[in-house]
Amino acid sequence: MMKPKIVLKVGSSNISNGQRIDEDKIAAIARLISELRARYDVLLVSSGAVASGYTRLKIDKSLLPNKQALASIGQPLLMQTYRTRFQKYGIEVSQILLTQNNFDSRTQTQCAKDCIDTLLAHSILPIINENDSTALTEFVGDNDRLSAYVAHYFGAQLLVILSDIDGYFDKNPALDSNAKIRPQVERIDPAELEAPHTPNASFATGGIVTKLMAAHFLLKRDKAMFLTNGNNLEVLRALLLEGRQTSGTLFGTLPEAICALDSVR
């Protein structure tokens, strides 16, 4: 029986401390993915190229040409870190860099999907990132929304976004100690999509708004997204391997293919 397909998006804040790539965090993610692959086909969307490049060249990343240069330095460094960590579990990895053009053309979208499906059929882990070295600023804008595109166009049942927050709160938890996580959200108010982007980490590009945009994109297409803290991977283990939601926010309804954990052995 075919395994359900999931997309796991890892943000810069999950793998970088603001100055360097945290290899222990990548090791924890590699371990989790090795466990998930027993039940799921996993696509990994990973930020971190610019943060990796900055470890070798300290230039102002707010300037687009500098950011592109840092990404071109950092992408192979990031991939080497992933390759080394996944080797421990006997997992071979591949790199796929996407731009807006890959989603503007049905032919290019299908070509990318065929490549990914071929990799998965041979038990290769696709690691996807925006092609920051050549992409225009008008592209998807960040890997939150890129991951939503990947989940939809490449046929995943669920998008998981690992972040530096525990979920989507009913109030701003930084301003209100009584803020509570919304465990499930079926609809996003358009006004919530218009707030300023407020990334927490120095190499992050989005914030909660870009995550809501990703969720909104998928909800409109009857697909689901789960938002959880990448510093507490046990929440995701519980959801995907035990069928228990202990924290985090589920946008939409957990797909039947994910709920029926006994269907894949």
Image (tube, rainbow, N blue to C red):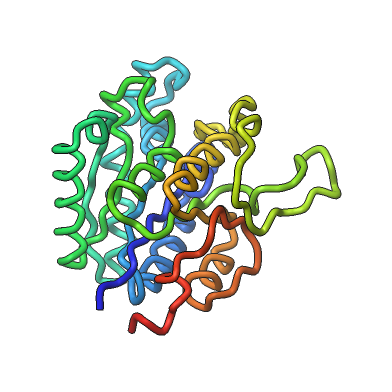
> Position of 48 compared to 173: left or right?
left
The location of residue 243, given as percent across then percent down, is 53, 75
Tag count in the figure?
0
In percent of the image, x 26 and y 54: which residue is there? 126
Image quadrant containing the C terminus: bottom left
Question: Depth check: 123 or 251 in front?
Answer: 251
Question: Depth check: 71 or 148 in front?
Answer: 148
In percent of the image, x 59 and y 33: which residue is there? 199
Image quadrant containing the N terminus: bottom left
The location of residue 157, given as percent across then percent down, is 38, 60
In percent of the image, x 42 and y 28: which residue is there? 141
The location of residue 3, given as percent across then percent down, is 30, 72
The location of residue 112, given as percent across then percent down, is 18, 45
Query: Would you place residue 22 above or below residue 124 in this image?
Result: above
Quarter of the rendering containing residue 50: top left
Quarter of the rendering containing residue 32: bottom left
In percent of the image, x 36 and y 75: which residue is there? 39
